[in-house]
Amino acid sequence: MTIVVVGGGGREHAIIKKLKENATVDTVYCLPGNGGIAFDAICVPEIKATDLEGVTAFAVEHQADLVVVAPDDPLAAGMVDALEAAGIRAFGPNAAAARIEASKVFSKNLMKKYRIPTARYEVFEDAAAAIAYIEEQNEFPTVIKADGLALGKGVLIPESLEEAKAAVREIMEDKKFGASGNRVVVEQFLRGPEVSVLAFTDGKTVKPMVSSMDHKRALDGDKGLNTGGMGTVAPNPYYTPAVAERCMEEIFLPTIRAMQAEGCPFKGCLYFGLMLTEKGPMVIEYNCRFGDPETQVVLPLMKSDLLAAMNATIDGTLAETEVTFSDGAATCVVLASGGYPEAYEKGIPMFGFNADGNVDGATVYHAGDARKDGQLVTAGGRVLGVTATADTLAEAVKAAYAATEQISFEGLHKRTDIGQRALQATV
Ligand code: AMP
Ligand code: GLY
């Protein structure tokens, strides 16, 4: 069977490695892929993840049995619609369902209409009105979100009215995030531990995967700038069975039903970004896809077959399909380029990998690298994700960090405290 995975980061690498555990999968292409994904798939650097026509033509030409669309932008642009129109089986939501991530206004209005717990908010199309509202609320910090996709950077959390005014102007007038900032959501700042839950859903049934915890800030102690994620652990100790039950009743099922009622049932992997507040679990954000780097700790713990879960998601048979996870724990430590998330150099040679691209005691998910004359070199901000699994979280953290010591490149930056908050929560 031939599978095409669209994307080229650590998440896509994790999806590919898991799919390949199924013996019927013999050929995997990754469009575009990257230097390290090439250990596990045939990469096609000429076809970008956002190239709807290119991906569709490739899938038709290579008679793909399944195309997995992993990143948000092609999903929002309708890649799954295009593939289906060409008669290709595709995993991921169509454009209408992908709005749950692609428009914050859509998702906030959905939550309000269907009474799904989330931060109180207002939508503005005009900077002066947004500022007047913030002044009137006079609650800081406050949260300002650009409506559209903004590479995970469209959320600003000003601490004062001055900062809030500057933030609104940056988004709405200077268009820091382009057309994404034509509308903004201003919402209440919530407090509490954050939990990421990825879930398979076929539009009717929802099967959550093991929970996880991201570490978004660049530096230890949650300091520094926001990044795409510097590391993850699974499971998330704050997500107890009681919390999980509540999330299922108050958030997951109502969301699936809401999307159905709106005429855009969600089929694919739905990512619930949750905050466990004093008033109960609330939705911070939805993503219409697997999280990155959450996938790099969630899929290694998956016991049941990923291909079967994806097929059931497409076929609407999730209710009858087993989706199970091991009782162990996983930790992913991201190795980033010096300077990330701001400017960084590319093309720096990297050393220490085994012949299969991994290191002893851990799996390496290649996120932003390339090959230059056979040598792996850096090619992105987040370069590698080093994941170890173990019976306990403490062991997984230790093993992941020990494994990172085998890899070296100039300027390598990693956080040294991935998993510490989770470990403190378990004592
Ligand atoms: P997002 O891009 O929606 O994931 O938001 C990025 C980060 O901003 C989240 O992971 C939260 O840490 C934070 N955030 C977003 N919305 C809120 C909120 N209403 N209250 C507190 N923090 C928030
Ligand atoms: N790690 C957060 C995300 O994938 O959006």
Image: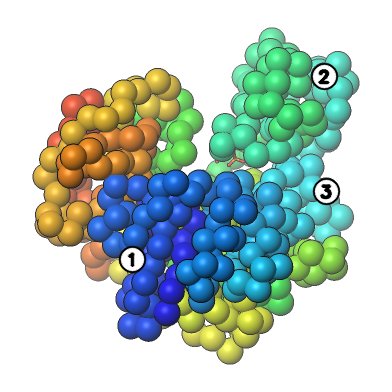
Q: Residue at x 73, y 42 (%)?
A: 104
Q: Nearer the viewer, residue 179 or 167?
A: 179
- Circle on res. 109: 3
From mark 3 to mark 1, how far is it between C-alphas?
A: 37 Å
Q: Callout 1: helix, strand or loop?
A: helix
Instruction: Tell me if 84 is positioned left or right of 218 in this view.
Output: right
Q: Nearer the viewer, residue 377 or 202?
A: 377
The quarter of the picture where the C terminus appears is bottom left
Compare marks 3 and 1 and give the one earlier in the sequence.
Answer: 1
The quarter of the picture where the N terminus appears is bottom left
Compare marks 1 and 2 and give the one earlier in the sequence.
Answer: 1
Q: Residue at x 68, y 49 (%)?
A: 77
Instruction: Tell me if 47 is positioned left or right of 203 in this view.
Output: left
Q: What amino acid is labelled 3 in the image?
A: Asn
Q: What amino acid is labelled 1 in the image?
A: Lys
Q: Residue at x 65, y 27 (%)?
A: 177
Q: What amino acid is labelled 2 in the image?
A: Ala
Q: Residues within 10 Å of mark 2 (few under 14, many from 20)?
A: many
- Circle on res. 127: 2
Q: Residues within 10 Å of mark 1 (few under 14, many from 20)?
A: some
Instruction: Tell me if 171 is positioned left or right of 122 in this view.
Output: left
- Circle on res. 218: none
- Circle on res. 17: 1
Q: Position of residue 215 (x, y in %)?
A: 42, 41
Front tag of 1 and 2: 1
Is residue 257 in sight in this rendering? yes
Q: Give the vertical position of 30 relative to 118 (above or below).
A: below
From mark 1 to mark 2, how far is it between C-alphas?
A: 46 Å
Q: Residues within 10 Å of mark 3 (few under 14, many from 20)?
A: some
Compare marks 3 and 2 and give the one earlier in the sequence.
Answer: 3
